[in-house]
Amino acid sequence: MKIWSVVASLFHLQRRSPPSKLCSSQFLIKCVTTSHVGRLQALESTTRLMRTGYWLTDSSAPLLKRDFRDVAHAISVPVLGSLIASMTVDSKEVGLTDFPRSERPPIVIPFFAFRVMVGCGLLMLLVAWGGTLLSLKERLLLQCALLWTVFLCFPLPFIATLTGWFTAEVGRQPWTVYGLLRTADALTPFLTPRAAAGSLLVFCTTCVFIFAFGTFYIYRLLKGGPAEDLLHTPPAASPNRPLSVAADLPSTAK
Amino acid sequence: MILYWSLILALSMLLYVLLDGFDLGVGMLFGLSRDETRRRHMLAAVSPLWDGNETWLIVAAVVLWGAFSQAYSLLVSAFYVPVILMLAGLIFRGVAFEFRGRARRTRAIWNVGFVVGSVVAAFMQGAMVGALAKGLPVVNGRFTGDVMTWYSSFSALCGVALCAGYALLGASWVVKKCEADARDAAYRAIAPLLLVVLVLLIVLFFHALHENLAIMHRWLDRPYLFLVPLIALCAIAGTLTGVRRRRDNQPFLMIVLLFICAYAMLAISFWPYMIPFSLTVAAAASPHSVLAFMFWGEGLFVLMLIYTVYSYHVFRGKVDLTSGHY
C-alpha cells in the first residue's frame, strides 16, 4: 500500500501540478524517512512496531495488520513491511513480545494515532489527486462536492501532525534516548508536580487559544469561497503561511 | 575544538540578542503607539525578518545542547519557569503577526498578544542573564535550587533593563527602516529610552555592589574590562549625535555597538566559566568525539549566516507598505 503510494507519488511529482505536489511529496518523504530510520537503527525501535502493530516476531513481515493482537485474522500485504523497513524482502521484523513487558510502550495510543495519521494523509492525497484530475478537465470550480470536501478537510493536516507526534512520542516510551536514558531517569530532579502541571497548563492554554482562533480565521477564509483569481495565488503566499493566501482578495475584506 | 564551539555559541547568542532584540523592541514600542498607520509601519519594518531572527535562538540552544550538554541540562532545569514563559511569549507574538491582519473585531487580542508576548520574552531573557550573573546554587554539576530560584530583585531588575534595552534597539531600527510619522516618533523615543537604560544599568551596578556579588570582583581582577564602558560611552555619544543630526542609520549602528559592549562585558567577566563560578566552559563541553562529529554540522551555521545576510539585503532600505501582506 505504502510502496504503491511511493511509486504513485514519484509518478505524480513528474506531472508537476502544484496543489497535489506538496501533499504527495510530503507523503513520499514520510515513507522514505521511515525506511531510512528503519535501516539506521541496529535494534528496531519499538515505535515502528507499535504503529504497525506487530505483536509476534515474523519473518517476511507483512504490512497493515488490522488487529494488533490477533495476527491470524489480520488482513495484510505480504513482504511490504519488510521491504519498507530494510529494502529487502526477507528481513526479520522484531515483534513486541521480544521485549520484556517493562520495555514496552503503551500500545493503544500509537496504534490508533498512526492509523489516524495515515488515514488523514491518504484522504488529503485523494482530495489533491481528485482536484488535479478535475483541474485538468478545467472543471475545478464547478464541482460543488469537491469544494465542500476541501472545505471540510481543512483540519486534517493539523490532526495528522498531532497524531504523528503522539505516535512518535508515546511509541518511544519508556525511553527518552533509546536504549540509554529512561524517561523516568531523565526527569529534572527538583521538578515539583505543581511546576510541571503549571507548565502543562501554560502550554495547553496557549495551544487551545491559538488553534481555536486559527480554526476560526481559516473557517472564515474558506467560507468566503473561492475567489476569481484562485489559480494565481499572490506572490507572497507560501505553504508555511496558509493565511497569507488570498490576503488581498476582495472576498476576505479586512 | 572547545574554543571553537564556545565562539560559535557566543556568536549565535550575540546574533540572537541583536536581531531578535530589535524586533522584540519593536513589539514593545508597538504597545506605546495608538496610531494604526504608525503601527502598520512598525510591523512592516520587522515582519519579513522576525522569524529568521528567532532561528538564532534555536541555533544557540542546539549548540548548547550538543556541545555543552552539561550546561544545557543545568540551565534548562534551573530556568524551567522562565524558559516556558519566554516560549509562550514568543509563540503569542509570532502568531500575532499572522492573525492580526486576518482579524476584524478580534484585532485587539493580537495587539495585546504582540506587545505582552514581546515584553514577557524580553523580561525572561534578562531575568535569566541576571540570575546567571548573581550565581546559581550548584553542587557537583547539579542544580540544587528550586523552580523559583531564578527570581530575585536583581534578576527582575535585569529583566526590566533588557526590556528597555530592546525597546531602545527597536526604536533605532524603526528610525532606520521607516519614514515620516513612525520615524519621527521613534527619534523622539530614543533619548528617553537611552536615559532609562543608563539609569537602570547604574542601579544594577550599585545593586551588585551592595549584594557584593562575586562577579564584581572580576572587575577588580581584570582592569582592562573598564575599556569596554569607554567604548560604550562613545557609542552613546554617537547615538545622540545621530539623533540630533537625523542620520537614519547611525543610531541603530551605535546601539548595536552598545549591545556588543554589554555582551562582551558579560562574556569577559564570565570567562572561563559558562555558569559563573560553578561550571567552566571546558567542564561543560561534550567529549572531543562529539565536538568533532558536530563540526560538520557547521555547514548549516555558515548557510544560515549567508541566508541572514541575503534576507537583510533583499529587505534593505525603507519599508514599503504597499507590498506587505501584514
Image (spheres, rainbow, N blue to C red):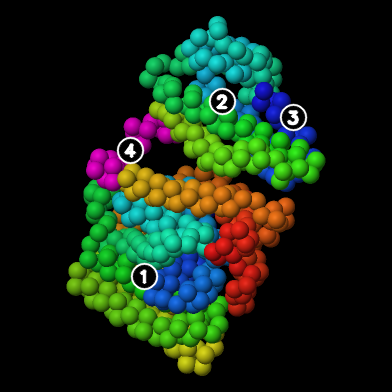
Residue A97 spot, x, y in % from top left: 46, 13
Q: Nearer the viewer, mark 4 or mark 3?
A: 3
Quarter of the image for residue A37 reads: top right
Task: Provide the chain ID for the residue under circle 3.
Answer: A
Look at mark 1 in the image and give the residue it sits on.
Answer: B163
Examine the rendered structure and indicate whether residue B306 appears above or below residue A160: below
Give the residues drawn in magenta, as a range. A175-198
Q: Residue furthest left?
A: B210
Q: Is residue A195 magenta?
A: yes
Evaluate if marks 3 and 2 touch, with contact meaning CB atoms under 8 Å apart.
Answer: no
Label 2: how many residues lie within 10 Å, few (<14), some (14-19) or many (20+)? Answer: few
Q: Nearer the viewer, mark 4 or mark 2?
A: 4
3 or 2: tag closer to the N-terminus: 3
Q: Residue at x 60, y 12 (%)?
A: A75
Look at mark 2 in the image and give the residue it sits on.
Answer: A42
> The disc labelled 4 sits on which kind of residue?
Leu
Q: CA distance from mark 4 to mark 2?
A: 26 Å
